[in-house]
Image (cartoon, rainbow, N blue to C red):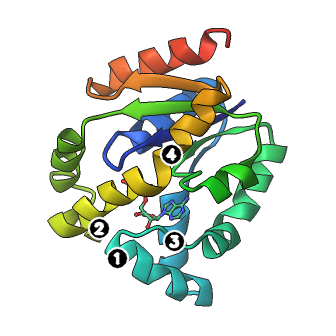
Amino acid sequence: MRIVLLGAPGSGKGTLAGRLAGELGVPHLSTGELLRAEVARNTDLGRRVAPYLEEGSLVPDDLTEAVVRPTLDRARAGGGYVLDGYPRTIHQARALGDDVVVVHLALPDEVARGRLLSRDEGRADDADAAVVDHRIAVYHDETAPLLDLYGRRGALITVDADQPPDAVATDVLAGVARPR
Ligand code: ADP
């Protein structure tokens, strides 16, 4: 099973992905984590990626693919994944292919903003209100259009993310189990 989580920054993609992956017995892949790990290793690629993470802009598709593609392909061959943070652009949605179940974690911007600014994971891109606002705007401009794309395909499950993590996970598992 290949599950994709779409939602604004702060919508709980990481938390939910970890739980779903545990329930379904597939790996949790976070493209944000893969990109941050590349930066931490201080590779050539990591040095090119770093400025985008700092300013809260999307990493360009070619760099993103170079970092995440090997891991995505390996997990796909291994039987599936819960994917958190990808696709974020139409180009990435095309690269991912069709046979994915897409879960939209719906959350008002103000709630997302409040969560990010009080998050205690020590991420630099959560500490600065201007960067947080930019990430939310980028989500609306570049990633939210994917909701229409997947909605038209009948592949979209929308869940209210403004609930405690247990309730979100219950709703998502029920949605994934429902025939589409
Ligand atoms: P959040 O969803 O809270 O912003 P992520 O860890 O998913 O957290 O993403 C952090 C940053 O990593 C994004 O602001 C962006 O710069 C980069 N990033 C993550 N996934 C992608 C992607 N698929 N394409 C381009 N950039 C990405």
Circle 2: residue type: Asp
Q: Quadrant of ligand 1?
A: bottom left
Q: How crowded is mark 3: few (under 14 residues within 10 Å), some or many (20 or more)?
A: some
Return the disc, 3 or 2, that comes first in the chain's sequence: 3
Q: In which quarter of the image is the N terminus?
A: top right
Circle 3: residue type: Val
Q: Distance between the residues labelled 4 and 2?
A: 23 Å
Snapshot quadrant of residue 148: top right
- Disc 3 to disc 4: CB gap under 8 Å: no
| Residue picked out by circle 2 | 125
Please state if 165 lies on the left or on the right of 115 as rendered: right
Q: Confirm if mark 2 falls within 8 A of ligand 1.
A: yes
Along the viewing direction, whichever of 176 and 97 lies nearer the viewer? 97
x 77%, y 45%: residue: 97
Q: Which of marks 4 and 2 is in front?
A: 4
- Disc 1 to disc 2: CB gap under 8 Å: yes
Q: Nearer the viewer, mark 3 or mark 2?
A: 3
Q: Confirm if mark 3 falls within 8 A of ligand 1.
A: yes
x 32%, y 57%: residue: 137
Q: How far apart are marks 3 and 2 (CA)?
A: 14 Å
Q: Which of marks 1 and 3 is in front?
A: 3
Q: Distance between the residues labelled 1 and 2?
A: 6 Å
| Residue picked out by circle 1 | 54
x and y, in percent, of residue 68 in the image: 66, 63
Please state if 87 lies on the left or on the right of 142 as rendered: right
Name the mark on residue 145.
Answer: 4
Q: How crowded is mark 1: few (under 14 residues within 10 Å), some or many (20 or more)?
A: some
Along the viewing direction, whichever of 130 and 72 lies nearer the viewer? 130
x and y, in percent, of residue 178 in the image: 61, 9
